[in-house]
Image (cartoon, coloured by chain):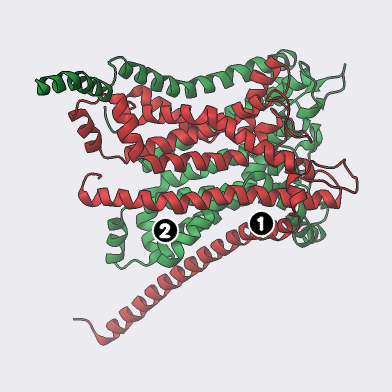
Chain colours: A green, B red
């Protein structure tokens, strides 16, 4: 009797707990749709970015047409408004190009040292320092460049070069001032070295050791093993890592804005290393506060944002396709 | 038959060849070492400069006061900037963390199809986007529509920056949880969402916290999206639909002022920011990555993870 009572009392409770443990039958569907929704949010954001930048800059595309891409006028005086983004596109490309030329050899050197040559004791701390430096905010790099690095580069590099080559040489013309394309590019290179180096290191470490051992067995030196076994295996990944660095260099704003000197109009066409220039990102950050809402000036800045978006998007897509070929860490899901 | 003369000739050839190769090897090693030195020096110089210049600016007043009038004798402090950064981090985590974790769950648990691959790819692309583009986008979408700069706009922009990072780390750490854990749950008749929330997420806890903290460290230093969304101010926060200040934004503004006190304050603010970012990064590495690696290795030894 008592047992019956107990089982009668506990049975519903047990059933209930089982139900609770199993969960309600609809919850699974809800869970699935919520998670799909969260994933779709990413795609929606990208679509919204394209749409919003397009609609925000429609005014300037109507007014200027294709000359917004090719023109070099930049005049925000009312009544004489005229906008052309060509100097800033060129400035971005030159700035990022110089930075890449400095950063790529150095970061490949670091990656090779970390993956092939470094003693085990040094490897972890050095890799950690490099990764921490990738986390330092860009505005801090900019502040350092402005307050410390600028005077060093002016006195030690720019003035001697200018004295040797003078105004007649094209790329060293102009009075060295410290706030110019060269300074911005070097600081930019310092900023992207950690990114490229740590990705390249991962890619080189992903090369199977048997490849290296085969080379060593044939009597190869370290460099020969690297050149014959590691490099061919990781080539596309290294290219991808550099392009990822390029994507970062193109979009980098704060440090460049603080250091590049901020020329506008046709004066911003990069001609000499010692001239102030302007990139797409820096002109947006600089002139944004002056642009009135709803005006053509603002539309022009948003239009530059659209061009920068397209550029960065293309660079990143290419880079990810190349990196994903080598480092297949994100392939497929756990369960179907 | 090899004559002694031929043997001697071979030997000189061999010596020359090996000597050349070893020399090249030494040259390359030297160059690589030089690369490391050249790259490390400025990187370490930044940290040293910020620490030496910044620590002298620190004081209780500096951390809590509002900034003084431009060019006046009393430079004031960066109180509103610190407060603003904390508020922004909180609000953007409120938007970004749930979305990021749900998205990561989708990629790891149901993402083994065409749609999953598309989302994964675009998520990776979004993670590397120029943040200034996200700032301009938020400006057009939120600030122009609502009509004023606001904390919400800033948090929305920062949540877009942090979302892909959280999604990726969530996915990666959920994948480290062995399939057998999930199958044990299914064998008990537990529904899928409960398996994910109670078993998988709690096993991957460390990875999730790591991802969230790393993304917080990332957005703490973002300046470009904030220029377009919160505008900056020199007062403490009053209401979520008004402009506020943030540390990176304050550093930028201070750097353009030609006063000595502004320079000192800029270094101080950079010091506070760098301490915040680096302590999160180092802390995460020490607390969580070690443990995660250990558990991962344990599973590897058991043969459950390939």
Q: Can you identify the residue that label 2 sits on?
A: A115
| Quadrant in the picture for residue A285 | top right
As drawn, which residue projects farthest toward the left?
A: A1
- The quarter of the rendered structure image containing the C terminus of chain A is top left
Judged left or right of residue A258, residue B172 is left
Q: Residue at x 47, y 35 (%)?
A: B166
Q: Which mark, by number, is residue A45?
A: none
Q: Residue at x 27, y 51 (%)?
A: B298
In this picture, residue A185 sits left or right of residue A180 = left
On residue B46, the disc is 1
Where is residue B34? Give x, y as percent. Answer: 56, 65
- Residue A332 visible in the current orientation: no
Where residue B97 sits in the image (x, y, percent)? 49, 31
Count of numbered circles in the view: 2
Question: Residue most toward the front?
Answer: A1
Q: Mark 1 or mark 2: which is in front?
A: 1
Is there any visible trace of residue B100 in the rendered image?
yes
Secondary element at tag 1: helix
Instruction: Report whether mark 1 lies on the same chain as mark 2.
Output: no
């Amino acid at each position: 009797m008592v047992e019956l009572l107990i089982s009668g009392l506990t049975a519903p409770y047990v059933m209930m707990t089982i139900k609770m443990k199993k969960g309600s039958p609809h919850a699974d569907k809800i869970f699935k749709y919520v998670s799909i929704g969260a994933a779709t949010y990413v795609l929606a954001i990208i679509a919204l970015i394209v749409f919003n930048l397009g609609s925000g800059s429609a005014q300037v595309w109507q007014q200027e047409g294709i000359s917004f891409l090719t023109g070099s006028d930049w005049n925000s005086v009312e009544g004489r408004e005229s906008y052309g983004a060509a100097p800033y596109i060129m400035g971005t490309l030159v700035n990022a190009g110089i930075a890449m030329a400095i950063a790529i050899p150095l970061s490949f050197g670091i990656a090779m040292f970390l993956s092939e040559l470094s003693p085990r004791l040094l490897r972890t701390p050095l890799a950690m320092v490099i990764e921490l430096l990738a986390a330092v905010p860009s505005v801090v790099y900019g502040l350092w460049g402005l307050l410390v690095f600028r005077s060093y580069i002016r006195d030690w590099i720019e003035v001697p070069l200018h004295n040797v080559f003078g105004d007649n040489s094209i790329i060293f013309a102009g009075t060295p001032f410290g706030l110019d394309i060269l300074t911005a590019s070097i600081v930019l290179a310092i900023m992207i070295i950690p990114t490229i180096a740590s990705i390249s290191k991962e890619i080189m470490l992903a090369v199977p050791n048997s490849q290296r051992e085969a080379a060593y067995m044939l009597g190869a030196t370290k460099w020969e093993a690297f050149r014959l076994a590691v490099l061919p295996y990781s080539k596309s990944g290294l290219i991808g890592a550099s392009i990822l660095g390029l994507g970062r260099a193109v979009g980098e704003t704060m440090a460049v804005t603080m250091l590049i000197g901020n020329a506008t109009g046709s004066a911003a066409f990069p001609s000499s290393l010692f001239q102030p220039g302007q990139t797409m990102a820096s002109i947006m950050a600089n002139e944004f506060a002056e642009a009135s809402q709803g005006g053509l000036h603002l539309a022009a800045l948003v239009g530059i944002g659209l061009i920068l978006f397209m550029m960065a998007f293309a660079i990143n897509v290419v880079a990810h396709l190349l990196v994903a070929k080598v480092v297949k860490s994100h392939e497929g899901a756990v369960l179907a | 038959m090899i004559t002694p003369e031929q043997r001697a000739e071979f030997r000189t050839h061999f010596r020359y060849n090996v000597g050349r190769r070893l020399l090249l090897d030494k040259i390359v090693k030297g160059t690589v070492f030089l690369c490391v030195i050249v790259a490390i020096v400025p990187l370490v110089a930044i940290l040293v400069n910020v620490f030496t210049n910044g620590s002298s600016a620190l004081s209780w007043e500096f951390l809590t006061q509002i900034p003084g009038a431009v060019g006046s004798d009393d430079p004031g402090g960066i109180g509103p900037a610190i407060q603003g950064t904390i508020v922004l981090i909180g609000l953007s985590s409120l938007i970004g963390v749930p979305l990021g974790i749900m998205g990561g769950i989708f990629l790891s648990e149901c993402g083994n199809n065409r749609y999953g691959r598309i989302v994964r790819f675009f998520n990776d692309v979004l993670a590397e986007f120029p943040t200034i583009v996200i700032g301009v986008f938020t400006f057009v979408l939120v600030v122009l529509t609502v009509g004023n700069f606001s904390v919400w706009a800033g948090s929305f922009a920062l949540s877009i920056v942090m979302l892909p990072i959280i999604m990726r780390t969530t996915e990666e750490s959920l994948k480290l949880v062995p399939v057998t854990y999930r199958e044990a749950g299914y064998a008990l008749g537990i529904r899928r969402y409960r398996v994910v929330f109670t078993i998988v997420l709690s096993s991957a806890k460390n990875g999730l916290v790591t991802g969230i903290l790393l993304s917080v460290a990332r957005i703490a230093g973002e300046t470009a999206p904030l220029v377009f969304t919160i505008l900056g101010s020199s007062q403490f926060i009053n209401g979520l639909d008004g402009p506020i200040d943030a540390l990176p934004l304050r550093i930028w503004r201070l750097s353009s002022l030609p006063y000595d006190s502004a320079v000192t304050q800029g270094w101080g603010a950079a010091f506070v920011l760098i301490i915040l970012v680096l302590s999160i990064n180092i802390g995460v590495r020490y607390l969580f990555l070690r443990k995660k690696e250990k558990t991962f290795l344990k599973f590897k030894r058991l043969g459950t993870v390939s």
